[in-house]
Amino acid sequence: MSTSPDTLKTLFITGAVNLHAVEKQALSIMTPQVARIENYPEIADRLREHIEETNDQIARLDEILATFDTSGSVLKDAGLSFTGSMAAISHSVAGDEILKNSFANYAFEHFEIAAYKSLLTLAEDAGITQATALLQQSLREEQSMAQWIDEALPMVTRRYASLYADGGASTAKV
């Protein structure tokens, strides 16, 4: 049984609206982290860079959605932004905040990678070729960030352990 082109188009648009909200959520997760990081300047720098990329990804999704005379969902954007903010706040009370944030960021990047891959599949199957290059660019950025976090995790863990040993949990946080 094949899926009709109209159904694929509807699913693609819904997926793009949902991914728009996910990118807004990413901003609400990363922005408070950057504001709190003191002992890990390379992480703060990479997060700032990825915040810029995320803003570009949102703009790309806006461009794609505009071709269908629609836009992101204010309700979905606000809802996911709120949950992202709550996740960031919940980690801020942990003594090992930097580690928890690193784990969560790594998982979230893979969530975004999966979402972009799924949306690319829908675009391909629906023949929505004008979106492919924009989505692939965003996918590459997410993959790059996930790889960076993967490679940085041993450094973060070791620095956290060293700071903890030198001054206790309160100075090792961020």
Image (cartoon, grey):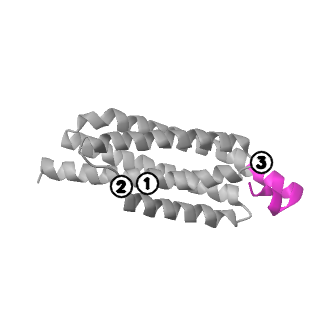
Classify 10 as above or below 126: below
Q: Quick one: 93 or 169, which is closer to the camera?
A: 93
**Alpha carbon distance from label 2 to label 1:** 6 Å
Relative placement, left or right, of 31 versus 77 is right
Identify the residue under disc 2: 18
Q: Label 1: how many residues lie within 10 Å, few (<14), some (14-19) or many (20+)?
A: many
Q: Secondary structure at mark 3?
A: loop
Callout 3 amino acid = Asn
Chief secondary structure of the magenta span?
helix
Identify the residue under disc 3: 39
Q: Quadrant of residue 172?
A: bottom right
**Alpha carbon distance from label 1 to label 3:** 28 Å
Callout 2 amino acid = Asn
Residue 20 in the image, given as x and y percentages of width and height = 39, 50
State which tag comes first along the sequence, 3 or 2.
Answer: 2
- Whether residue 31 is visible: yes
Q: Residue at x 70, y 66 (%)?
A: 94
Q: Residue at x 55, y 51 (%)?
A: 106
Label ID, residue 22: 1
- Answer whether residue 7 is magenta in the image: no
Residue 84 in the image, given as x and y percentages of width and height = 52, 60
Label ID, residue 122: none
Q: Secondary structure at mark 1?
A: helix
Q: Quick one: 71 or 42, which is closer to the camera?
A: 71
Number of numbered discs overlaid on the protein picture: 3
Q: Quick one: 80 or 3, which is closer to the camera?
A: 80
